[in-house]
């Protein structure tokens, strides 16, 4: 099993604010284009997405990666995500 980071891209008023949708190539999470929706242990990206059960509406997609440094800003988003559960 690997650790997967499940990410939603795009926005929809039902589950993600459009307030910060201006693209920032240095940090896709800061710009609001991507949102980290879960961190799970799974056998595959598809299993990770299924385990998180994230909402996905029009103009959105959900994907998973096991490489923390594969997406600009994912490391900072993970730190923020973890802090939100420890406070």
Image: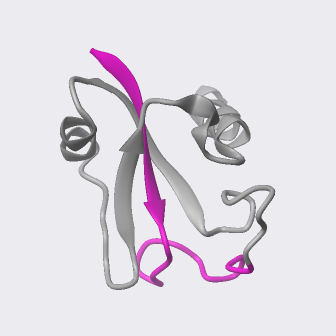
Who's the residue at 58% across and 31% down the image?
A: 68
Who's the residue at 64% across and 33% down the image?
A: 69
Residue 41: quadrant of the picture: top left
Question: In what quadrant of the picture does the N terminus appear?
Answer: top left
Could you say where residue 38 lies in the image, as x and y percent from the top left?
Answer: 42, 41
**Would residue 26 appear left or right of 50 to someone viewing this image?**
right
**51 w.r.t. 35: above or below:** above
Could you say where residue 39 lies in the image, as x and y percent from the top left?
Answer: 43, 33
Inspect the magenta stretch and tell me whether residue 79 lies in it.
no
**Would residue 77 appear left or right of 52 to someone viewing this image?**
right
**Would residue 17 appear left or right of 42 to someone viewing this image?**
right
Who's the residue at 59% across and 77% down the image?
A: 17
Who's the residue at 67% across and 57% down the image?
A: 29
State which region is magenta: 1-22
Dominant SS of magenta comes to loop
Pick whichever, 20 or 71, lies toward us: 71
Could you say where residue 25 lies in the image, as x and y percent from the top left?
Answer: 76, 64
Pick whichever, 25 or 79, lies toward us: 25
Inspect the magenta stretch and tell me whether residue 20 lies in it.
yes
Could you say where residue 5 lies in the image, as x and y percent from the top left?
Answer: 45, 37
**Would residue 65 appear left or right of 73 to someone viewing this image?**
left
């Amino acid at each position: 099993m690997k650790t997967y980071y499940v990410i939603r891209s795009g926005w929809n008023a039902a589950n993600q604010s459009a307030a910060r949708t201006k693209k920032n190539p240095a940090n896709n999470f800061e710009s609001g284009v991507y949102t980290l929706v879960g961190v799970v242990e799974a056998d595959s990206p598809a299993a990770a997405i299924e385990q998180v059960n994230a909402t996905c509406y029009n103009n959105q997609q959900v994907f998973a990666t096991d490489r923390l440094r594969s997406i600009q800003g994912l490391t900072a988003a993970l730190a923020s995500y973890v802090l939100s559960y420890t406070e």
